[in-house]
Amino acid sequence: ETIRPCVQAGVAFLRREGVEPSESAVTDLLERFSPAMSERRLDHDLREFDTGGFLAAWAREHRLVLPAGLPDRRLVEAFWQPWIGCLDVFPESSRALAKLTAAGYILGLVSNCAVPERICLVELKRLGLAGQLKFIVFSSTVGMRKPHKLIYERAMTEAAALAPGLSIDEVLFVGDTPVADVDGPAAAGMRTALVRSGRWDGNATNLAHEPDLILNGIGDLPREVPSIRRPESSDRVR
């Protein structure tokens, strides 16, 4: 449902720039965009979907002459602007993050999302989460999706910049997708917590890596995190 207004917003931007896609070109964009994104999610190399590259290829196929520099950040951000407002968070998330921050943990977000970072940040602010996160890593910025190792390396770099001397096994990666949020970070050396949700059926016997924690909900995290601390570890970052 979000893609149609995104396509409309992108086409409106092009028209403001003096480019007039035909009705058939717009229909083609509507029909191909979602399947192209879905196909990229199955990419064995874990490359993130490139909105700008897709729009450039679409424009060439329809012989649209784009102004110099297009497609650029402005077009991609205009395209994704209607995406703002489409997310919801688990009701207990904000309170859990507040408790963890008060307990001395430094929190970051690592997310698979093809939407450009600036648009994602606007959505996080709308949800009231941006101020609770000290660093944010999006696959749209890294260019690779979880469970590619680069995205965990970027997260570790961001975390270590906030806590010099941080060891990777002091980091707890929390999520609800076994491959992306347990197997990937565990292979990188992080500890993991898997949250029961619609993305995981709760069956732990089929997991490639056993998570350090299994949570019924994100609201359980502040209570359960201390149970996996090593005695010698600090309170700086998880």
Image: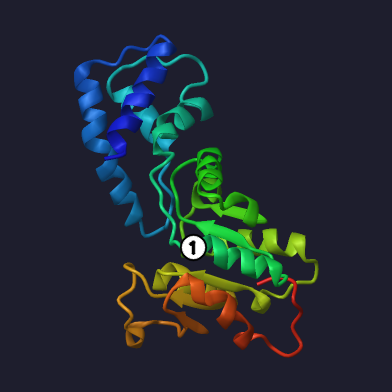
- Residue 226's quadrant in the figure? bottom right
Question: As drawn, is 213 to the left or to the right of 41?
Answer: right
In this view of the protein, which residue sits in the foreground, 69 or 30? Answer: 30
From the top left corner, tell me how far across and down residue 119 is, in percent. 51, 38
Is residue 69 visible to us here? yes
In this view of the protein, which residue sits in the foreground, 231 or 93? Answer: 93
Seen as rendered, the residue at the extreme bottom is: 231
> Taking 100 as reference, is 63 above or below it?
above
- Residue identifier under label 1: 148
- Residue 65's quadrant in the figure? top left
Residue depicted at x 54% and y 40%: 122
Is residue 187 visible to us here? no
Residue depicted at x 50% and y 43%: 123
Question: As drawn, is 27 to the left or to the right of 71?
Answer: left
Question: As drawn, is 27 to the left or to the right of 51?
Answer: left
- Figure colour scheme: rainbow
> Taking 221 as reference, is 73 above or below it?
above
Mark 1, Cα crowd under 10 Å, few <14 / some 14-19 / many 20+, is some
Residue depicted at x 49% and y 56%: 111
From the top left corner, tell me how far across and down residue 42 is, in percent. 32, 57
Q: SS at mark 1?
A: loop
The quarter of the image holding the C terminus is bottom right
> Taking 84 as reference, is 10 above or below it?
above
The quarter of the image holding the N terminus is top left
Residue depicted at x 64% and y 51%: 131
From the top left corner, tell me how far across and down residue 72 is, in percent. 51, 27
Seen as rendered, the residue at the extreme top is: 18
> Taking 118 as reference, is 12 above or below it?
above
Q: Which residue type carries mark 1?
A: His
